[in-house]
Image (tube, rainbow, N blue to C red):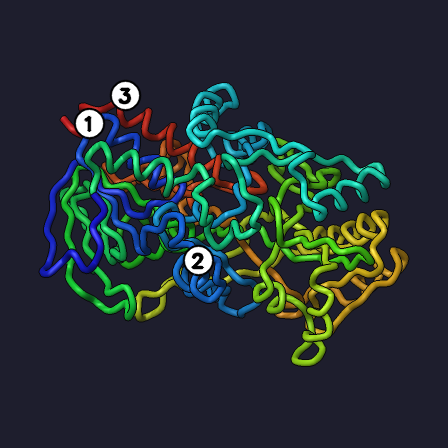
Amino acid sequence: MFIKPEDIVSDVTKTCDVCVIGSGSGGSVMALEMAQAGLSVIVLEDGGYHRGADFNQREPDMFGENYIQHNARTTKDTAITIMQGRCVGGGSAINGCDCVRIHDPVLAHWMEKYGVRDLTPEALRPFVEKAERLMKVKEITEQEFNANNSLLKKGAQALGYRGEHFSHNRENCRSCGYCIIGCAYDVKQAGHTVHIPQAVDLGADVYTYARVERIVQKDGSAHSVTGIIMDRESERERARISVEAKVIMLAANTINSPQILLNSKIANSSGHVGKNLSLQPQTPVVAVFDQAVTFHRGIPQAYAVTQFEEADVKAGLGGFRIECISGSPGLVAVQLPGFGVETKQLMKEYPHFACSMVLVPDQPSGEVTVNRHGRAVITYEMTDDCRRRLMEGMKAAARVYFAAGARKVLYTYNEPVVLNDASETGIVDRLGIEPCSLGLVSSHHYGTCRMGEYPTTSVVDSYGESHDVKNLFVVDSSTHPTSSSSHNMVSVMALAHRTADYILKNRDRYFG
């Protein structure tokens, strides 16, 4: 069942087979897999459980309710906004339904450079297919494109650039465009609509607004989880909760999973907990057309320019992608350059905007630590190579839009930068990218609990189990040694299915 804070009148002490911390892409899969196996499951979710009309399509409410820190989490220097879900379903509940597989060379890169084993494309494929089957993944047809996606494709084809249609996990989409603040029509086939409800039907208990503080080990094995049940409005402690479990699954995201481990002072003999952070930075590029585009309606991300994306065994995922994106008025106004009247004048052209994100897979160059209050601190420095590729992507996006007939193109520098012709893209080289000079967002984070077979350089093994603490697994994108793909929902879910399969094949070891 779902247990809300108002259902609790005293401290909670529970015992179960499996305790899952977090209910996003990895946690929701694990809850379902373990419940289907007949095991008792308790899920602890920091946010609430929302369906249908609970997603009221109001930006202040939905960003506040469904995102960490009201979608205001940033790196320590405030240069990059970190978008991270906080609700049942996690990122799968508030993402753009983008279903992208890990490139085969990336798997080979992880095996060769980081010592991950048993992760060939052939070995992973059944779990990818299982994840996609549960979410009813299919390719978006051109008939489903909105004008924003059609314009990006038109410009790419005019320049001879390679591109692709996204696959997605929607059923009977209403094309409202509010995907990233939650679907009011429940068309997303995701953690909050598929995996967690099925797990609950099989007997799992889900505690909402349950904030995990520490994982406790005993005799070298994971023993219990402690934390608080929060009042929904104030986020103050309503009760304490303690769950003793035979197996503990940590799925709190690349930022919060290392935070919990660091605060627990466990699983870090390698010294790599919180290290090796990749943020895959993105920056929006806005084009203005004479005709109305109404880019905030329809499926947001249906087409991507993949001409410049690279994947090889030596370096993993590289290059850059240009992907369509939508934006509600408040979110767009925040990203646009200028202030006050300047922003007001730009927003008058909102109906004529087309928008895309330049997305750059980066190599690990950041770290998550905790301050004296136990809160996560995100430190990140963009490498010169990442900066170069981001700038190349910004220029390429402008060329695509002008090829599609744009009247002008805007970059999100602090001072308004307006291009009237493709020949003016050189301004990017002159301005460069300095911290806090350009609007940057991170929606896909990796690496802070890196997996691999070498205990001195990784936190968990190739199936997500801690090298130091038996029966403690990490099942989110923090285990990915580098960027897995341009969007990580499918990769996280596939690897979670794989870990579940491993545990159940060794059931006597964990539950005997």
Disc number at residue 38? Answer: 1
Of all residues, the one furthest to the top in this rendering is 122
Residue under the point 25% across and 23% down: 506
- List x then y, in percent, for residue 374: 31, 65
Quarter of the image holding residue 209? bottom left
For the residues marked 3 and 1, what is the alpha-carbon distance in whole angstroms? 14 Å
Q: Residues within 10 Å of mark 1 (few under 14, many from 20)?
A: few
- List x then y, in percent, for residue 58: 48, 62
Q: Nearer the viewer, mark 3 or mark 1?
A: 1
Tell whether label 2 touches label 3 (CB within 8 Å): no
The residue wearing badge 3 is 505
Dot 1 lies on which element? loop
- Amino acid on which the number 2 mark rests in the picture: Asn
Q: Residues within 10 Å of mark 3 (few under 14, many from 20)?
A: few
First in sequence, mark 1 or 2: give its number. 1
Residue under the point 14% across and 57% down: 8
Q: For this view, does 365 lie left or right of residue 404?
A: left
Residue 343 vs residue 508, the one in the foreground: 343
Q: For this view, does 155 lie left or right of residue 463?
A: right
The residue wearing badge 2 is 56
- List x then y, in percent, for residue 442: 55, 55
Dot 3 lies on which element? helix
For residue 284, above or below residue 108: below
- Amino acid on which the number 1 mark rests in the picture: Gly
Residue under the point 63% across and 50% down: 325
Quarter of the image holding residue 453? top left
Residue under the point 67% across and 47% down: 324
Disc number at residue 459? Answer: none
Of all residues, the one furthest to the bottom in this rendering is 341
First in sequence, mark 3 or 1: give its number. 1
Residue 62 vs residue 358, the one in the foreground: 62
Q: Nearer the viewer, mark 3 or mark 2?
A: 2
